[in-house]
Amino acid sequence: MDKKSEEFNASFQRAGHCLYCFLTALIIMLLCTRSSPLYAFNIWDDSNSYFTVGKSIFKGLVPYRDLFDQKGMMLYTMYGIASLISYKTFFGVFIIETIAAMLVCIAMFKIYSLYMRQEISLVLMSITAAFIYSTRSFWWGGSAEEMMMPLFMWGLYLSMRYFKEEYPSKISYKTLLIGGVLAGCVLNIKFNSLGFFFAWMVMILIADLTAEDLKISHKLKRCVIHGCIFLLGMLIATIPWIIYFALNGALYDWFHVYIYLNVFVYSEKLPMLQRIYNMCKIIYNHILANPYCGFMAFLGGVSFIVMKSRWIEKLNVIMLAGFTALLIFIGGVELQYYSLPLWTFAVLGGIAIGRIAEYLINNSIYKKSSRSNIKDVEDNEISSNKDCKNIFNYSSKSAKSKRHAIRMITGICAVIIAGIISYTTSMNIFFMKYQRDDLWLYHFTDMIENSGIENPTLINMGCFDAGLYTTCGIVPTCRFFQTQTIKLSDVGEVQGDFIRSGRTDFVMARDNIPEHIDDHYELVAQEDWEQSGYELTYYLYKRVR
């Protein structure tokens, strides 16, 4: 086979692997995320708030300055792009989630391929992905953590590949730059998840200091150069947002809301020992709440440390997992979806399983039988070289056809198993029973759209974004368009002023009736709704005077 044919076959095989990863991601996302067309609507307030801010970007509003929320600009931009695909539904978000899951699957396949044959890698990739996306940590779909999963998984692949195949040679500038860009993307989605890439770069510096017999001055010089390249990658991922906020005169708002308030106001004020205790307790609870991925990550990590590998590979995994958990949970906030990045390390459990499978296959009865048959053929005298060649070609083609058939059947079975895992373990499946007409949200939407008011305005009171901005296609006119987790006096004052002065056509409130609401508004709809074990009451008010 000539070189061109080999390159074509390799490209064709890579395309096949990518297609397989896409199909796996598509099936898992169809079942696991409420953004899927199989669900009436994704009523998660977090996802709706991201969608509201994202679509508002393309309507001329500037996040942080004109609309107050706490996540990073890259996340809002992704949701803004999703709104261009579908303005009043989550179909665009579903597409982005599927692409993100596909990238996660490709990275997992590459990680597994470092340690085992590709056939086993594809099967384990499908099953591992199903376990990750059906955890409680995935929640209802569309979280910042979910959007960062490709960044963590590709970062893990680059790091494990370097320490397994390239160390003690120095890391390539290309890999460093890519790692920096990945870290920059995390910085601009949710920066408290940067612990992973902090450890990622620390491990590169450790490699620089221990890899080769160089003078200390040369080692330190290499550390500086590598650190600068990594930071350059982070800067490349951040420059678009610096330019955007500078052109809109909102650099201060960006820094104040996204950095200052998240660091100094959002997290709990506790002594360090209490923080560490709380962090360990939170991680333990998350492992219990997500037993499949918790089991794979924890026991897989232990097996990776004890299995035959270099010390620096083991240290690398410990550092990456440890600092990921540290920066996420040191603030003391315990939310189910916070732990999703930790399940990146579920691949360690897959590696342990794959190595066992590889051993069993290599030492199977079938393998021994095949070797025995080959030996018998070699021992027999074949008088005609032509006949020998024909027999060999026939045997080779037959074996190759059987292998392809086995791979295809195994791959199909793995995707089916991934679908079964997703369907039986995802917390969201029960929500498929709800249709559009079952949701209070669409009842309120119909009332607003049939009110006869052109371009109606709305304010969301007493809760996070409940989704009415999305279903009605409304861009908020109030900076505090929803309740905030950060305790700021401005929120209540600004929202109260909107009510007292009757500045929006509609007011949506939950559980509590806003003060002074009767001055300008009257109640036009009220519905009860059970969600996550809580009985909630939603009110819709219309301005009448």
Image (cartoon, rainbow, N blue to C red):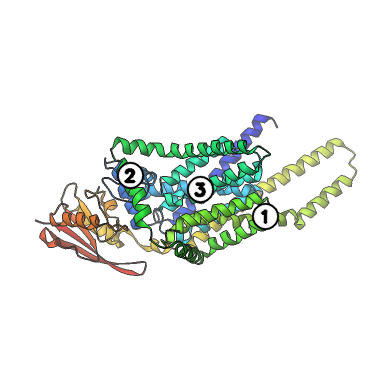
Near mark 2 (Cα within 10 A), the count class, few <14, some 14-19 or many ≥20, is many
Q: Does residue 40 appear in this view?
A: no
Mark 1 residue element: helix
Mark 1: which amino acid?
Arg
Label 3 secondary element: helix
The number of discs equals 3
Labels 2, 1: front one: 2
Can residue 377 be seen in the rendering of this structure? yes
The spot of residue 141 in percent (x, y) is 41, 55
Crowding at dot 1, Cα within 10 Å, few <14 / some 14-19 / many 20+, comes out as some
Q: Which mark is residue 374?
A: none
Q: Which residue is mark 1?
A: 355
298 to the left or right of 46? right
**Residue, disc 2:** 254
Residue 110 percent location from the top left of the image:
59, 46
Q: Nearer the viewer, residue 545 or 361?
A: 545
Which quarter of the rendered picture does the C terminus lie within? bottom left
Report if the CB atoms under discs 2 and 3 are less than 8 Å apart.
no
The mark nearer the N terminus, 1 or 3, is: 3
Residues tagged 1 and 3 counted as in contact (Cβ below 8 A): no
**Distance Cα–Cα, label 2 vs label 1:** 47 Å
Residue behind mark 3? 198
